Image: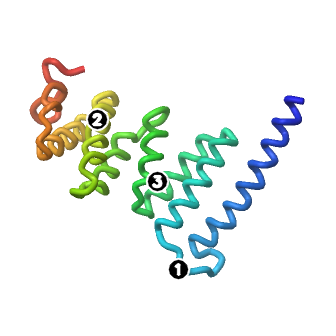
Amino acid sequence: MGAQMATHSRAVCGRVLAALALLCGAASGQSGSSGHTDAHKAQVLLAKSEALEAAEAHYAARELLREAAGTIPDEGLLERLAALDDASGSGASEDYQRLAKLLNRPEQRDEYLRVLRRGLEVSIRDGDSERSAWFEARLEDAGERSGRLWVGEGGKKAEYGV
């Protein structure tokens, strides 16, 4: 029974991926369709990446998101890519930096600060002193002083850093 369920799940995932591939082709203009917005393309690609993850094709999901985030400036794509890279990959601090740049608007302040804080943590964890300094500077510009405990002058680890 368990093997049948697994086979059925893979078949369903395969059909979903095929349908999403058709949608992605239409969203990217491959089928001659036009008028799709970046937001629509991003939603289709996010759905496709989730289907790939459900089919346990995690690397393919990450690569799909990385490619899409390079051409479509979408918060959802970058948020998901950053989360995947943060959990098990490389490049998360760059993803958070790109996401912060998109979120730097007054109406997005809370989300912007959340992304800056996480970006600082990740860049410190990954030893990315250049991005650590970038996140710290943006946090300070926003009135946050907490970064000083972690990153010293010029992005070097401070006395009380990790």
**C-alpha distance separating marks 3 and 2:** 22 Å
Q: Which residue corresponds to the image point at 13% horizontal and 30% vertical from the top-left?
A: 148
Q: Secondary structure at mark 2?
A: loop
What type is the residue that disc 2 sits on? Asp
Q: Quadrant of the N terminus?
A: top right
Residue in view at x 67 percent, y 38 percent = 56
Q: Nearer the viewer, residue 41 or 108?
A: 108
Label located before the other in sequence (3 or 2): 3
Residue drawn 52% across the image and 80% down it: 35
Q: What x and y, as percent, mark residue 149?
A: 15, 25
Which disc is residue 77 wearing? 3
Q: Mark 1 near mark 3, Cβ–Cβ under 8 Å?
A: no
- The disc placed on residue 5 is none
Residue 80 position within the rendered picture, expressed as x and y whole percent measured from the top left = 47, 46
The quadrant of the picture occupied by the C terminus is: top left
Instruction: Please give the label number shown on residue 35.
Output: 1
Q: What's the distance in space between the residues labelled 2 and 1, CA to CA?
A: 40 Å
* Labels 2 and 1 touching (C-beta < 8 A): no
| Discs 3, 2 touching: Cβ within 8 Å | no
Nearer to us in this view, 142 or 136: 142
Helix, strand, or loop for circle 3?
helix
Q: Give the residue type at disc 3.
A: Leu
Check disc 2 and report the residue beneath it.
128
Q: Residue at x 65, y 47 (%)?
A: 52
